Amino acid sequence: MTAFARFLGEKAERYIELRHSLGYAFSKQAGTLRAFVRYVERAQLDAPATQTMALDFVLSFGGAANGRATRHGVLRRFYEYLAVYDTQTEALERRAFPRSRAIPPPRILSEAELASLIDACDRISPGTPLRGRTMVTVIGVLASSGLRSGEVVRLDRSDVDLSNGILLVRKTKFRKDRLVPVHTTTQTALRHYVRERDAAFPTPKDQAFFLSSQATVCRRAVCKAHSLRSASSLALMTASL
């Protein structure tokens, strides 16, 4: 490791600790900074941290324009911190990677499409029935409650009050908690899932409400179903569950 890469790595870790101490989750941003340090190390780059260095790093990733803008924004703020320790650090342009303002039109599922999706999920893994049941129930909660997919799969058992039909969503957007009531038919569907889940995994490895086929928390959303937040198909979904 070069002296500059070592210096950069130390400052990046101190900056990450600082952001954590201020209450920020800063997980994706920390990954970007550590990837930047690895990039500098592999390329054997020397001090100071320059605009070209940051631009080349950002352009080394594929993806959409907004992703590049986000990575560059993380580096821009880190460069401001780094300049306190190395005055030769170059300032990064705020608008070097403009964000795309194009908003894709919403894709609202019809009741027939939603029913077809649920039926397909229920049959997805005959050898592991709980996998399909988990997907069906997650989609049901998404469609009937309007929660985000990440919020649903992060629910712990203590977050789901089946007696009163209340979901506790923790540290969601803007790191706030909120209570979400669910319909009585959704409560019934959740109780059915709990019975199947507990029969399959009486001693789970994790306290997550929705379990993977390895009895652990679903680290990834089981589907990209953000559009379900626009699908007001409560009656169909709860009946299908």
Image: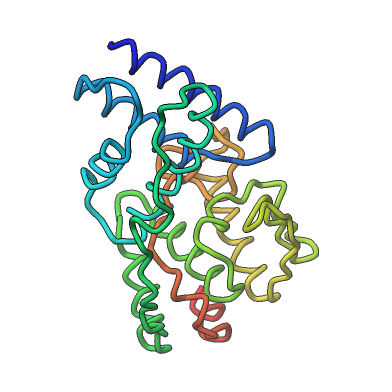
Residue 116 falls in image quadrant: bottom left
- Of the pair 236 and 203, the residue shown nearer to us: 236
| Residue in the picture at 40% in, 53% down | 131
Q: Which residue lies furthest to the front in this view?
A: 88
Left or right of residue 58: residue 133: right
| Residue in the picture at 35% in, 49% down | 128
| Residue in the picture at 67% in, 50% down | 171
Left or right of residue 211: residue 105: left
Residue 236 placement (x, y as % from top left): 51, 85
- Of the pair 101 and 186, the residue shown nearer to us: 101
Residue 34 placement (x, y as % from top left): 39, 29
- Of the pair 230 and 28, the residue shown nearer to us: 28
The structure's colour scheme is rainbow
Q: Indicate whether 168 appears above or below 76.
A: below
Left or right of residue 57: residue 223: right
Q: Indicate whether 13 appears above or below 178.
A: above
Which image quadrant: the N terminus?
top left
| Residue in the picture at 72% in, 55% down | 176
